Every structure is written in C-alpha cells, then in structure tokens.
Amino acid sequence: MALFDKFAKLAQDRAALIQTELHPFGTRIDEIYSPTEGRIGSQRVVLAGTNNYLGLTLDPDSIKAAQQALAEEGTGTTGSRMANGSYGSHMALESELADFFGRRSVIVFSTGYQANLGVIGTLAGPDDIVLLDADSHASIYDACRMGGAQVIRFRHNDAADLERRMRRLGEQAKDALIIVEGIYSMLGDQAPLREIADIKRRLGGYLLVDEAHSVGVLGQHGRGLAEELGVEDDVDVVLGTFSKSLGAIGGFAASQHPEFDLLRYASRPYIFTASPSPSSVASVRAALRALRARPELRTRLWENAHQLYSGLAGLGYQVGPQASPVVPVVLGSPQQGMAFWLGLIERGVYVNLVLPPATPNGQALVRCSVSAAHTSAQIDHIIGAFAELAITSREAAVNS
C-alpha cells in the first residue's frame, strides 16, 4: 500500500460532504469585528463557536501588554524552555498561576495539547495504570498512548463504574492515575467530581483534572470545577489551556506535589518544543488579571449560557444534559448536519459542526459556545436562526 492510500476513505467521506466552496473543515473567517462578530465571505456572522468564554481576545489591556512585549522582547524566543526560552515573563506567569490556583508548582507549555502530552505522557509510563473517562479529549488519549500506560476506560461521568474498576485493581488502585475533565468540550457536561474525589479518598490513586473549558467559567474565583465543588485538595494535578477563557494560546499544569517540577527534566514535549512567544505570555498575564479582578464576566457568561440553552431547548432541539457555556444541538446524519451548518451561516450565525467519529451513534451535532461578550440581542439572534431552521425542517418533512 502506498504511503497515502490509508487516507482514501477519509477523502471519500470528505468529498461526499463538501458540495460548496464553504465548508466546516477549517472555515476561513475573513474579518474579525469584535469578540463576537466577524465576516465569512460576504456574510457578517455572530461568532458562536469560538471558546472565547470571557470575551478577552480583544481586551485592550491584553493587547497593550502583548504589543509592549513584542516591541521589547521580539517575536519569539527561538528556543525551548530548557535552553534559551525561559524569559522572566515565562517565570512570572508560572508564579502568578501558582498563586491563582494555590499550588506549589506550575509548568507552562506552548499549547494545551502539549500540556496533556507533556504531563500525562510523562507521569503514566508502561508500568502505570490510567483510569480514564471514556469521553476524554483526544489529547488525553494521545498522551496515554505516548506514555504507554495501561488504560482502563470507565463509562462517561459514571463514578460507580470507576469505583468498580478500581476495586478490581486491588492494591494497584492506590497508584493509579484517574483522569477526568471539568467541562467536557462536546456536550458541555461536568464531571461528577465530588463522587470521584470520594472514591479517590477511599481507594487511593492520583486525580488529574483537565480544566481547559472550566477555568474562568466555574468556581467563585474561576479556578474551575474543583473549586466549584470544594474538592481542590483532592486534585493532584490541574491541567488547562490559555486558548479558552484567557483568549490566547498555551497550556499549563499545576500541582502541589513537591516533586512535580522534576517533570521539566523528563517531559519531552516540554524539553523539545520552542517556548511561547513573549507577546502571548504577556497577553495571558493581563487576561489572568482580568479574570481575577472582574467576576462580573463570569456572571454575564452564565446569563448568556442559560438564555441560549433554555431558548434552544424550548424550540424542541436535543441539547446537552445541563446548562453550560458549551451548548450542543444533536442532529441526524452528517449530511443533515452539513446542511444545517450552512443554513446557520446563511442566517448570520457561525457555530462548530462536529461529525463522526467524534460524535456517538453516527450523528452530527452543532456546537455553540457562549461568551461573556455576547449581548442578549445576539443570543436572541442565534435562537432565531435555529427557530427558522426548525420551521424549514418541518416544512421539508411535510412536503417530502
């Protein structure tokens, strides 16, 4: 078989869906007007698929900090954190994140994906066991494969299933690594973290929580689901990203473990990757200050989340299991999903189209994400677009 022949089925599936120049596989956003508005081709759209939860991508303080760092420190470090890529600003960001999370150590990575690879893939080696929520992010699965650990999946958000599997491990359970997410990125639901923390206290193990979609979103201070549920002391490692609530790019891992910093000398994704640019680090530091100083952003975010969730549920759509800034709508086949996604663009709404195998049962879903920067009128516009498509779909069914 030739090198690229393995992709033949992928090419066929993609060609069957792409019937127009506009498609969801790397949509080109031609112009950005605000954190919530842009232009795709000739169509002005409300951006409702960006993970920009606090609306900080165009925050004036973050932009000013990034511009100053760009002028003073240049466009990049041109080196890894282990070589010349640790500037004073990188160290300062780690210190500020450690203070924010109340943890002894924080390690900053170039992306959130690399944070998962660098921490999970290094901690969990061939002699280790990982107990993993079945709906975990692809980067978590990739990290487990990289490390070579034995992976035991438990049913999504099923603490009882986790406990059963841990009990089968016997004494091995006390050294196992349990991995869950704060908010799951596809359905917007939260891990049953209180129950999982209780299992860990009784049976042992280490608990790692990927708070990528919950930092800035949950908790009195925005530290995520562990803070929201009062179980931060039970979490051994917090992972996260700067590309959601903090509006930039990069990732981090935080821990109270006294030997956690040793990962800097063992983690290949940390050692062999160029460090984040000074401008990105500067914008994240400014965004973190905004997250801490402006709790009203979280309040506004949740007002918008409840407005959109209840509005779409009220139209009869199958939405996620609980209100969240991630609001999915489950549709039918990939072809139906594609037509629906295009219909939303035509009505001035951009969302994410998610297709199998990333979705269960061969169904497609459109994934909305809400921002604190959305106005109530913009949320109404999104709901209105879904309402028009619901009417269109019913009329098509009657006429078929």
Image (cartoon, grey):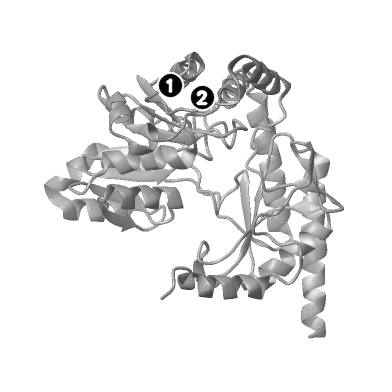
Outermost residue, bottom side: 400
Residue located at (41% from left, 20% from top): 102
Which residue is at the front of the view, 96 or 387?
Answer: 96
Report x, y in % for residue 301.
67, 35
Q: Specify few, some or many for label 2: CA neighbours under 10 Å numbering under 14, 14-19, or 20 or more.
A: some
Q: Specify few, some or many for label 1: CA neighbours under 10 Å numbering under 14, 14-19, or 20 or more.
A: few
- Type of amino acid under label 2: Thr
Q: Is residue 363 above or below residue 212?
A: below
Which residue is at the front of the view, 104 or 311?
Answer: 104
**Are dots 2 and 1 in contact, CB under 8 Å?**
yes
Question: Alpha-carbon distance for marks 2 and 1?
Answer: 7 Å
Report x, y in % for residue 190.
48, 45
Report x, y in % for residue 262.
27, 26
- Quarter residue 79 falls in: top left
The residue wearing badge 2 is 77
Q: Is residue 194 above or below residue 362?
A: above
In what quadrant of the picture does the N terminus appear? bottom left
For residue 84, the mark is: 1
In the displayed structure image, the side of residue 305 where residue 82 appears, left or right: left
- Type of amino acid under label 1: Asn
In what quadrant of the picture does the C terminus appear? bottom right
Outermost residue, front side: 2
Report x, y in % for residue 315.
74, 60
The reply to whether residue 181 is in sight is yes
Secondary structure at badge 1 equals: loop
Which residue is at the front of the view, 310 or 96?
Answer: 96
